[in-house]
Each structure stands twice: as C-alpha cells, then as structure tokens.
Amino acid sequence: MKLSDRITQITGGGSDGWDVFYRARRMVAEGHAVTQLTIGEHDIGTDASILDAMNRSARDGHTGYAMVPGTDLLRDTVAARVQTRTGVPTTRNNVLITPGGQAGLFAAHMAVCNPGDVGLFLDPYYATYPGTIRGTGAVARAVQTSAEDAFQPRAEQIEAKVDGAVSLLINTPNNPTGVVYSPETLQAIAELCQRRDLWLISDEVYDTQIWNGAHLSPRALPGMADRTLVVGSMSKSHAMTGSRCGWIIGPEEVISHLINLATHTTYGVPGFIQDAARFALNAGSTLEDKIAAPFRRRRARALEVLAEQNTIGLVPADGAMYLMLDIRATGLTGEGFANALLDKHAIAVMPGESFGTAAAGHVRVAMTIDDDRFETALKTICAFASEMAGQQAAE
Ligand SMILES: Cc1ncc(COP(=O)(O)O)c(C=O)c1O
C-alpha cells in the first residue's frame, strides 16, 4: 500500500553522521564502558519536589482529560513568566501548552506553512528541524552559518535563501553550538523578517541556561510580537524531559487556531504534569539555578582545560549544555575524529556533521556526566587531538 509523501519524507536521506552515536550505544549494550557525551539529557532526574507535586495532583484526581489549550492556571503562570522576562504583554490567550517543545515546533510550522511553502532553518541545527518542517508538507531549506562568524547567522546569508520562504526557525541559546545570539544578530533577523514578511519561530528551550551574556527573546523586539511564535519547554530548564510539557507563545489568533490543531492531534497534556510544571515554575529561579548549576560548573572547568592546549578551538560556549569543539587542526573530519576517539578511548561525542554541513570539522560534547569524569574525558579529548595533529604534521 502506498504511504503519504508527507510521512515517508520526514527523514531526509544522505549521510547523517549519527553512525558513531549508534555504534556507542551498541558498545554499551555489549557491556563495554563508554563515556557518553552525546545526548542533551541531564544526569540528574526530575527534582523530588516536582515529583511530589505531580503525585499530589494525580492523587487529588487530576488524571482525567485536561483542558486542551492547557489549564488556565498553567497558561497564566507561563504568560506571567514570559511577560516578566521579556516585558511583552502576554496573557493566557497567547499561550498553548504542548506535549514538549518538539510538539510545539511542529504545531508552529503547521500554523504558518502551507504544503510546498519553504520553511527556513539555520545550519548547524538541532536534529529534528528539517524533518519537523517536512512533516507539515513544507519544504525545509537550510541556511548555512559559518564557523568564522562563531555561527552567528548573518542577515545576508538568510536573505540569499529567502525566495518562497514563509518562516524562519532560529534557536538561541543554540543546540548544537552553545552559542547565544547577540542583540545585533537578533535585531538584523527581526528586520529581515519584517522586510521579507516572514514568520519567526524562535526555539527558546534553553533560555535558562546562559553562562555569559543574557537571553533576548526576539518577540520583544519592535514589531515582532505579531509575527513571532516562541517555543518553550520544561525539559531543559527543569530536567523534565520525560514529562513532555512545553508551550507556544504567539498572537491570540494563531493560538486559537493552534488549539484546534491540538484538539485534533494531542488533545492536551495530562493535568498532573501541568500541575507539576506550574509548581516548578512557581519555585522560581532558585530551582532553575540548581538545575543549571552542573552545566555552569562543567563549562567553567572546560574553559580551564581548553586554555591549557592549543589544538582544539572552542566555539563561544555562552549557553546550553553543549560545547562545540573545533578540531580542524587535527586534519580529521568531525566524523573521523569521533570514530577514532570512540575506538581508542571509548569516549562518544557527536560529529559536527550530524547537525548539517556548517559544523563539519567540529565535534559536540554534551556536559552531561559528573564533573570529575567530564574533566577527565575532556583532558583525554585534548591529548588525543594534539596526538592527531602531531601525526598530521609528521606526514
Ligand atoms: C534545540 C531544541 N529544541 C527542542 C528540543 C525538544 O525538547 P522537548 O521536546 O523535550 O521540549 C530540544 C531537545 O533536545 C532541543 O535541543
């Protein structure tokens, strides 16, 4: 039987650079000790206080269908939080609660892309981006950013790819690069969106993980609230990846249509998860800081380790739980480096090539193991890089 083009074309074909990831998983399954620095998952579970709130809510009976747009209480909490953080007037009518940020990304593209329209995204990119856009029937078009610009996108790079585009998807703080977009970058993107009449879909799921500088939501820039859909999530800020709770913030009219989409797809998010999310958000920055603290510490250690060598370059690591290492001085590709590192030292990192083409010659290191093991692994990576560079120089 024939399947729809929409479903069969979600994954893209071509080399996706994920072989090393699956190989590391196989090695672990076969009983080998592998240091896994691959995936954006905290090494702590959801905080006990959040689990208690979840349990209380479920025991109090919030186990039936919840309101499809989200409970009024959670929508109000998210709206107040967004308004406080951005200064943009926001009410519950600007908020749809979604089963995680990923569902929000898909719904946001469903809201603005017709089949055949072009949805732009920036390379390097979070792995699901092209498939998310294609899943709506739209054409996913990558815009390359450049290592030489520290992966800050330039308006002219986007403008060169804009024909036929209705939307632009951005992500700051960024996965995979750890880069935080500067106010100048975001201002130029905002002007471009207005000039070329684009929707901006702003993935801000790492907005509480800022190590240097400040998070700026482009929805707060002049003229942008009417054309920006912000995707947020409890996953990274509150170590609630498995709870599947996120949101979209946007103009009321868009949110009302998205509620129709949710009614016909997800039918909402469980009430006890929403109550737990509300508890977590009300716990404020103390809890958020506690969850971000391990990454802040490891990033600080990483800067010290990397300062002691000169083979690996570090892309400015200003946010999120990743370091993007420039290993081009070794003469290896990201894939070649990651495979050799796995073979020789049983350390698994993600090749830059698994996030598109722009981060070729880089590897992404997730800071998601305990501090001491992380530091040891990073030192091994540095020594290995210097050995590889030495071999290349001798050839
Ligand atoms: C950039 C980015 N956006 C969205 C997501 C999706 O997060 P979730 O669906 O768990 O909220 C992730 C997860 O790793 C991510 O890295």
Image: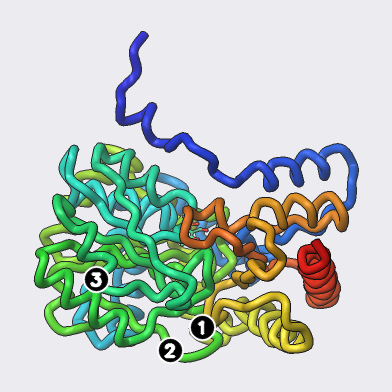
Residue, disc 2:
214
Mark 3 vs mark 2: in front: 3
The amino acid type of the residue labelled 3 equals Glu
Density class for disc 2 (Cα within 10 Å; few <14, some 14-19, many ≥20) is some
Please provide percent x and percent y for residue 26: 78, 39
Q: Is residue 135 left or right of residue 188?
A: right
Residue, disc 3:
156
The answer to which image quadrant residue 227 occupies is bottom left
Q: Is residue 52 left or right of residue 370?
A: left
The amino acid type of the residue labelled 1 equals Ile
Please provide percent x and percent y for residue 303: 69, 86
Residue at (25, 51) in percent of width and height? 119
- Cα separation, mark 1 vs mark 2, equals 7 Å
Return the mark for residue 289: none
The answer to which image quadrant residue 98 occupies is bottom left
Q: Mark 1 or 3 closer to N-term? A: 3
The amino acid type of the residue labelled 2 equals Ala
Q: Are marks 1 and 2 in contact (CB under 8 Å)?
A: yes
Density class for disc 1 (Cα within 10 Å; few <14, some 14-19, many ≥20) is many
- Cα separation, mark 3 vs mark 2, equals 25 Å
Q: Are marks 1 and 3 in contact (CB under 8 Å)?
A: no
Q: Mark 3 or 2 closer to N-term? A: 3
Residue at (69, 41) in percent of width and height? 22
Q: Secondary structure at mark 2?
A: loop
Residue, disc 1:
210
